Amino acid sequence: MRFVDEATITVRAGNGGNGCVSFRREKFVPRGGPDGGDGGDGGSVILRASNRLLSLYDFRLQRTYEAQNGQGGMGSQCHGRKGDDLTVELPVGTQIYEVTEDGETLLCDLSDPDTVFVVAQGGRGGKGNEHFKSSTNRAPRFAQKGETGEVRSLRLELKILADAGLLGLPNAGKSTFISKVSAARPKIAAYPFTTLIPNLGVMIDEVDPEQRLVIADIPGLIEGAHAGQGLGHRFLKHVERTRFLVHILSVEDVSLDSPDGPWSGFDLINEELVRFDADLGQRVQLQVVNKIDLRDPEAVQALRERAAADGRTVHFMSALTGEGVEDVVAEMWRMRDELANHEALVRLRETEQFDEEESDIEVIWVRD
């Protein structure tokens, strides 16, 4: 299945059923009063976030979604049946925008599993003529029409939710790394831009299988990505929802003789992140130099010493041979746990019922 992260659809709620005009007709009841039943309400269109879907591909194939109309009222005070609601499942992380002549408006963000949102309300059913009888009008020959259901044009935009986002220059070895630490099997080849769509991988804790770390492999970024170069906008938006970043740089792009310094590859991508979204520049980041099997151990040691001298925490690994991968994975787990604790603490503080001195939660400040 192709990965699609944008789609435009139309949703149409069901119309309410019309009320009925009817009069009671029975033996020995020559002048029975009005007994027209009410029409049923139209069905609504409901959006629900589901972990079963990872792409908006299906919404490129089907563009219109309609709920059922309500049934009209009938005689003998029989009310029409309500129209069935239509539940449309979307991937977790989908943002819903309403498209109008005046522009786009964000309606909801399905950022949590099983979140539901009524995007189009069904029309109310009309009342039958029994509701309109009075002392002055004992035989009303009219009923109420059902209301029209809402119709909306929507733009769906998927932003992947993950704990860690892998990013870096093209051909840095991100896909090889994610294939080593998870069951993901992205395309791997010795040329730039092998990865053209984001891939998701899941690491499972060997001690506690319930603990999982979701990794998003973002296609390689280039200079000018913030302005859309190399489809930068399409890729950078998937980084916004990650807890932290794993910035991978190939050892081939690191040189002690470089006029811009050996870490210019890191700085280039970080500059693109800041230009795209200032908050991304403050995201916690794990910097990794990959493919150290292509350099002599002495050259790698020289890079380690230079990183220490520059005050940078840089991990070195070879995703191909496995050297240093365990250390990187352990650091990713540590960062995930620290950030999860920090997020839990922020949520507790928002409730205004948290006493930091009495709580047994370890307070960890990752970054000011």
Image: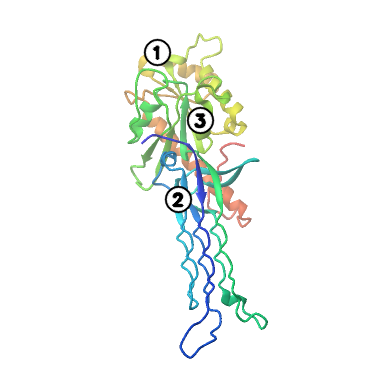
Kindly identify which residue carries mark 1. 298
Q: Earlier in the sequence, mark 3 or mark 2?
A: 2
Closer to us: 322 or 300? 322
Q: For the residue marked with disc 2, what is the amino acid?
A: Val
**Which of the numbered marks, if any, corresponds to residue 271?**
none
Give the foreground label among 1 and 2.
2
Q: Would you call the spot at circle 2 few (<14 residues within 10 Å), some (14-19), or many (20 or more)? A: some
Residue 198 image position (x, y, % from top left): 43, 32
Kindly identify which residue carries mark 3. 234
Q: Residue, x 54% and y 69% (percent of image)? A: 19
CA gap between label 1 and label 2 equals 58 Å
Kindly identify which residue carries mark 2. 88
Q: Residue, x 47% and y 33% (percent of image)? A: 165
Closer to us: 32 or 338? 32
Are the two marked residues, 3 and 1, in contact with CB atoms closer than 8 angstroms?
Answer: no
Q: Residue furthest front?
A: 30
Q: Would you call the spot at circle 3 few (<14 residues within 10 Å), some (14-19), or many (20 or more)? A: some
Q: For the residue marked with disc 3, what is the amino acid?
A: Arg
Instruction: Please tell me in which quadrant of the rendered image residue 129 appears.
Output: bottom right
Instruction: Please tell me in which quadrant of the rendered image residue 366 appears.
Output: top right
Residue 20 image position (x, y, % from top left): 53, 71
In this rendering, the answer to whether 296 lies above or below 48 is above
Residue 34 image position (x, y, % from top left): 55, 79
Give the foreground label among 3 and 2.
2
CA gap between label 3 and label 1 equals 40 Å
Secondary structure beneath dot 1 equals helix
Are the two marked residues, 3 and 2, in contact with CB atoms closer than 8 angstroms?
Answer: no
